[in-house]
Image (cartoon, rainbow, N blue to C red):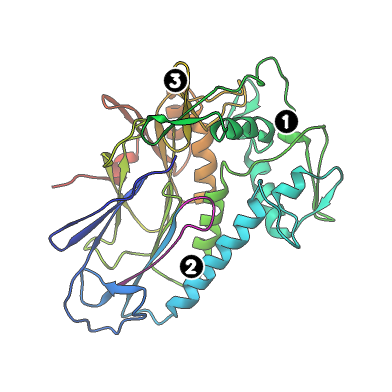
Amino acid sequence: MKKLFITISILIITITLSSCNLIVSPTTTSSSAVDSPNADYCVLGQYDDVYLCEKKTTSYFDTTVSLKLYYDENDNYDVLEIFDYFEDTLETYHQYLDKYNEYLGINNVYTINHSDEPLVIEEILFGAIEFALDNDNLITKDDIPLFDIALGPVLEIWHDARNSDDCSNTTEMGISYCPVPTEIDGVTFNINPSDIILNSSNMTIDFASENMSIDLGGYGKGYVTKVISDHLDTLNIKYLLNVGNSNVFAGGTNPNSEDGYYYIALIKPVTEFQLINEYFQYIQMPSGIALVTSGVNQRYFKDVVTSEIYHHIIDPTTYYPGGYCKSITIVYPDSAMADLLSTAIFLLPLDEALEFVNNYEDLEAVWYVDDDNIIYSDGFDQYVYLLE
């Protein structure tokens, strides 16, 4: 669902509200000992020798994507070159991972799903698919992977239901009321990821069963976040990358805060129209950490008959929306893996999910069940920030 973006200025502190996080960006009008790296994109930060340079785009992955650079006296890179790389990479991966459209001169997810024979694909798409298949058995239920890129045929049904001409937006502002799809019950779908055939010798992909298709949406934003952040890290750039407001990565020590952390806030995952977002947890992010949220409030509709919520995180064992909480937020050093894990862990019973996270090295999580039930993994307190 589309969210409202509201900016409220309080004294000299600009607080930007978004559908998944809050980024505090102090501004000032004082002079700086460092020349502005770019007058069009950069403003002075909290300190005189720090500039904040930001580029936003809404052209890719059906969401708002932003890159904020923290430029100080130790930097001498070209801001425009970084922003050009940022947009070029987003465009490239948007096209390759797109399951709804084809593009001239490339084989992407759409062409894979509409091909009747082995298809040669580019290395970057091959690598993205290979990454998913290498990790799809990390979390299973009844021996079925809970992260499954072969779930495409089922996900397409739910996508079509959310976007049906029979949906109505007149009952509740900002909320779609739609008929629940009936073509799922009693049907067996070919969704076994083992039936995806990758051949690294000739860079081809094929399916071993009929009526198969892939969907990389369960980790695509996290994957492109990793691609961009890995490149920026090689340049020793300090940045905060926000892909879709649910995939955030912090790179380098923040020179715009006293302790070097980046600060965001987690929004309450509500499924009723709200003019202003509410927050349930503030987070301090050190360098090299990804934060990924999966929740019922990101894409959903309400049953036109019963008003029951049907969100977009589909359980491969039932073909229906699953989960035992309203949202889970994962903190982990690898954004691609964090995105993959957040999707799968969301579908686990809470006791199993907590046990998994507590036993997975460097992984922490917080589950929002309701206002009275927020669950934290054993080591999550290191990321908790308490407002004074």
Residue beneath disc 2: 232
Q: Quadrant of residue 211?
A: top right
Residue beneath disc 3: 308
Tell whether 272 sits left or right of 296: left
Q: Which mark is residue 192?
A: 1
Tell whether 84 sits left or right of 171: right
Marks 1 and 2 sit apart, C-alpha to C-alpha, by 36 Å
- Which label sits in the foreground, 1 or 3? 3
The amino acid sitting under disc 3 is Glu
The amino acid sitting under disc 1 is Asn
Task: Look at the image and give the residue range highlighted in magenta.
Answer: 51-63
Q: Are marks 1 and 2 in contact (CB under 8 Å)?
A: no
- Residue 335: give x, y in percent of width and height: 49, 50
Marks 1 and 3 sit apart, C-alpha to C-alpha, by 29 Å
Q: Quadrant of residue 266?
A: top left
Q: Image quadrant for the N terminus?
A: top left
Q: Which mark is residue 143?
A: none
Q: Secondary structure at mark 2?
A: helix
The amino acid sitting under disc 2 is Leu
Residue 61 on the magenta span: yes
